[in-house]
Image: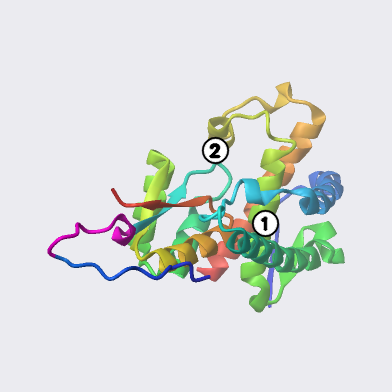
Amino acid sequence: MNLSKPSPVLDEKTVRKPAASKPWKVIVLNDPVNLMNYVVMVFRKIFGFDETRAIKHMMEVHELGKSVLWTGEREQAENYVYQLQRWKLQTILEQDD
Amino acid sequence: MIEFQLRVDSRILRGIIPKIEEYFASLRDCRWEELFLCPNPEDQDFSDAWKDGLKEDSSTDRYGLARVIKNAKFQHGFVQLEESEADSVIRGLSELRLAIRMGPLSKIEDRELETGNFDLDDREGSVRLAYFSYLVLAEMQEKLVSHAS
């Protein structure tokens, strides 16, 4: 699912960094259904996190209502959102500020 | 092969298995696209591919879960599945629990459901059955996750 569109060639001296180049954040939202050990397992499977890092993100989701799991290029971010939604975790994509 | 016995009283199990089958049948009516949003909804082709992909994946997961709950041994709390189907069944259980939460358990607050701090005796029979089903499915998922981790 490649959505990247061709970008015009810009002169770095005269043009500010375009908004489209800002990284994208993969954000998992809290839900009362999925079990903690399930969420940890999914984070480990999808992102290859070690247990400590996966638990840290799971606790963020649980206590703060959301956690940024990954930041980077749009296409890869979409891929992660799809995988997380496939595991029935509510996930959104947001562009970094 | 993964095999384990659920720790549930057989009388409770007899009461909830028909309900679990009923909830399972209702999954085909779930509109998950309202919960699992496509990140690029303005692109119709992309959005359709996203929804169709998730729908197809869910269908595979349900197939795996159906084999477990339609197995005659499940009537006695015995869970049996192939190792290769574990991920599908784990995801299918999440979908089913989510459907129960959004259906018969929809009147229970998130916090109450998460902590279990609410008086079940004050609830209707259908809610009690749904809650027991929800817990039994959680136990099943927890055991499978432990196995997979």
Relative to B35, B21 lies left or right: right
Residue type, mark 2 in image: Glu
- CA neighbours of label 1 inside 10 A, class few (<14), some (14 to 19), many (20+): many
Q: Chain of mark 1?
A: B
Which residue in the structure is indicated by mark 1? B93
Percent x, y of residue B53: 65, 66
Q: Is residue A48 left or right of residue B76?
A: left
Query: Compared to B5, does B10 lie above or below?
Result: above
Viewer-closest of A10 and A26: A10
Instruction: Check the residue under mark 2 and report the chain it is in.
Output: B
Q: Is residue B46 above or below residue B41?
A: below
The quarter of the rendered structure image containing the N terminus of chain B is: bottom right
Q: Are marks 1 and 2 on the same chain?
A: yes
- Magenta residues, start to end: A13-23
Please tell me the numbered disc located at residue B119.
none
Q: Position of residue A77 (x, y in %)?
A: 42, 63
- Residue B109 picture quarter: top right
State the image coordinates of residue B67 (x, y, percent, origin top left): 80, 68
* Image position of B107 (left or right of A50): right
Query: Mark number for residue B114?
Result: 2
